[in-house]
Image (tube, rainbow, N blue to C red):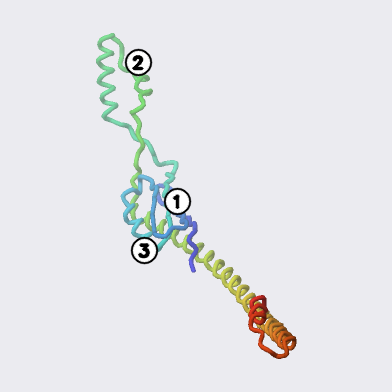
Amino acid sequence: MLSMTGFGRSTLAVNEGIVTVEIKTVNHRFLEIRSKISQEFSNAESGIEKLVRKKIKRGFCNINISFEPNDNVSTLKVNTSHLNSYLDDLEIVAKKHNISVESLLPVISQAPDLLAGNIIEIKDFKEKALTACESAIDELIKMRTSEGSAMAINIDEKLNMITTHIDKIESLAKVHDKSVFKQFKDKIESILDETGRQKDIDRIETEAAIL
């Protein structure tokens, strides 16, 4: 028996940084997958989903894949097209006001669109993403199996308790049936004695209905 709830986490160190995969499942009739994947591994999303469907058959599944780059890996890049456009504009302003372009450079440093997030290229990124995912899935399945075993034990204990109570009820029912039968028999014999062993059908039927 497998539990429907589970959690698995895996980390994988690569040359460029640390890949972390977290997978969580909760109860659901069918398999439904939702993923939040770092853009460095976005092209591996279809392969990751295929791997999940191969190993997990039911449940609402959340996948989170994040990437933390090493300190020596730059996560920003300069938008060169915007920079060139700003420099051209500064040259025009500098000539018009007879000042140096260098004196205007601090203006560029404040431009919000000169720096953009850099998607780090990770060697064999798809293979590494799948490796980390498989480890996380294995951890999740291990947890679901452990919880499922505990549930099975609990169910067996409840069934044994029910069986014990059924046996006790059946035993008491047999004693009760014998007691009721004796009471009925004694009552009928009493009625027959009172009527001189004549069959007083109405009274007998009344007593039988009461018992």
In the rendered image, residue 161, in percent from the top left (x then y), is placed at: 63, 73
| Whole-number angstrom distance, CA of label 1 to CA of label 2 | 46 Å
Q: Amino acid at mark 1?
A: Thr
Residue located beneath label 3 in the image: 54
What's under tag 2, amino acid-wise? Ser
Residue type, numbered disc 3: Lys
Nearer to us of marks 3 and 1 is 3
Horizontal side, residue 24 vs residue 104: left or right? right
Callouts 3 and 1 close, C-beta under 8 Å: no
Q: Residue furthest bottom?
A: 197
**Helix, strand or loop at disc 1?**
strand
Residue at image point 28% right, 22% down: 86
Q: Mark 3 packing: few (<14 Cα in 10 Å), some, or many (20+)? A: few
For discs 1 and 2, the disc positioned in front in the rendered view? 1
Q: Which label was assigned to residue 103?
A: 2
For marks 2 and 3, give the CA distance: 62 Å
Q: Position of residue 118 (x, y in %)?
A: 35, 39
**Rendered view: 79 above or below 142:** above
Q: Earlier in the sequence, mark 3 or mark 1?
A: 1
> Closer to the camera: disc 2 or disc 3?
3
- Look at the numbered disc 3 and give the secondary structure of its residue: helix
Q: Secondary structure at mark 2?
A: helix
180 or 140: nearer the viewer = 180
Report which quarter residue 174 is drawn in.
bottom right
Above-or-below relation of 149 to 122? below
